[in-house]
Image: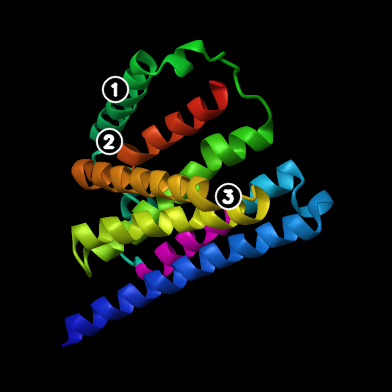
């Protein structure tokens, strides 16, 4: 009974933290709509986007973890070589195949992304914060309470939900286009979770997440 209660409490805390993260980002997106000259300013937006996801991850680690270092809790130290090799290899295979099979990609021009907001938010900061929370906290904690399959699906669904406020409020996406984006991010969330479970390292998902976001901005 005690273990059941502990599992239920851990599941509830994961749910609360997820609601907090998505809720705060939704509020910030609303603020960017109402006062874009302040809250949508690129540097402020970048810092807010990263902080809203990163800070709850660190707080959760501080509250729940009494034994491990922060690097061990987030799976950043152990098996890191395996994570880098597998994550990097999967990213190279995926984008290499996309380049070979997709004519539009071959015809696209390469533009090296520049600017602090782009690198801090989209390329490096947000992927790092998202991996800490959705795979380093949510996936790992849920694996111990509901099992790997449900943990993978729930963490991937929450990962996709985080992107909804921007799509709806800032990008004005609806209908099939919105559904397609949601399913795509949900699929990415599943792949990232599988890579972490396979390698037992957050680098397994962090490396392809970084590469994916860099390529999305660089090739267009």
Q: x, y (%) of residue 69?
A: 35, 55
The residue depicted at 23 percent of the width and 45 percent of the height is 200
Is residue 54 visible from the viewing direction of this image?
A: no
The dot on residue 93 is: 1
Q: x, y (%) of residue 170?
A: 67, 51
**Magenta-colored span:** 51-64
**10 Å neighbourhood of mark 1: few (<14), some, or many (≥20)?**
few
Quadrant of residue 89 within the rendered picture: top left
Q: x, y (%) of residue 8?
A: 27, 79
Of residues 64 and 14, the one nearer the viewer is 14
| Residue at image mark 3 | 50
How far apart in space, not on screen, are marks 1 and 3 (Cα)?
28 Å
Kindly give the residue lying farthest to the bottom in the view shown: 1
Position of residue 19 relative to residue 187, above or below, is below
The residue depicted at 57 percent of the width and 38 percent of the height is 122
Q: Is residue 216 magenta?
A: no
**SS for tag 3?**
helix
Of residues 60 and 186, the one nearer the viewer is 186
Kindly give the residue lying farthest to the front in the view shown: 175
Q: Is residue 55 magenta?
A: yes
How far apart in space, not on screen, are marks 1 and 2 (Cα)?
15 Å
| Residue at image mark 2 | 83
């Amino acid at each position: 009974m005690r273990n059941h209660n502990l599992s239920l409490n851990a599941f509830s805390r994961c749910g609360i933290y997820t609601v907090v993260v998505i809720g705060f980002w939704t509020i910030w997106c609303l603020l960017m709509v109402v006062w874009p000259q302040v809250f949508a300013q690129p540097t402020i937006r970048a810092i807010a986007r990263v902080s809203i996801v990163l800070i709850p991850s660190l707080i959760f680690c501080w509250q729940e973890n009494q034994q491990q270092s922060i690097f061990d809790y987030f799976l950043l130290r152990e098996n890191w070589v395996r994570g880098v090799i597998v994550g990097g290899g999967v990213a190279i295979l995926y984008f290499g195949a996309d380049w070979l099979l997709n004519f539009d990609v071959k015809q696209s021009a390469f533009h090296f992304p520049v600017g602090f907001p782009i690198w801090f938010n989209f390329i490096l900061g947000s992927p790092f914060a998202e991996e800490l929370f959705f795979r380093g906290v949510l996936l790992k904690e849920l694996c111990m309470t509901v099992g790997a399959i449900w943990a993978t699906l729930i963490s991937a669904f929450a990962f996709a939900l985080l992107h909804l406020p921007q799509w709806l409020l800032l990008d004005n996406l609806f209908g099939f286009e919105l559904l397609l984006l949601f399913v795509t991010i949900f699929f990415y969330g599943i792949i990232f979770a599988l890579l972490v479970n396979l390698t037992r390292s957050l680098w397994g998902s962090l490396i392809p997440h970084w590469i994916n976001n860099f390529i999305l901005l660089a090739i267009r």
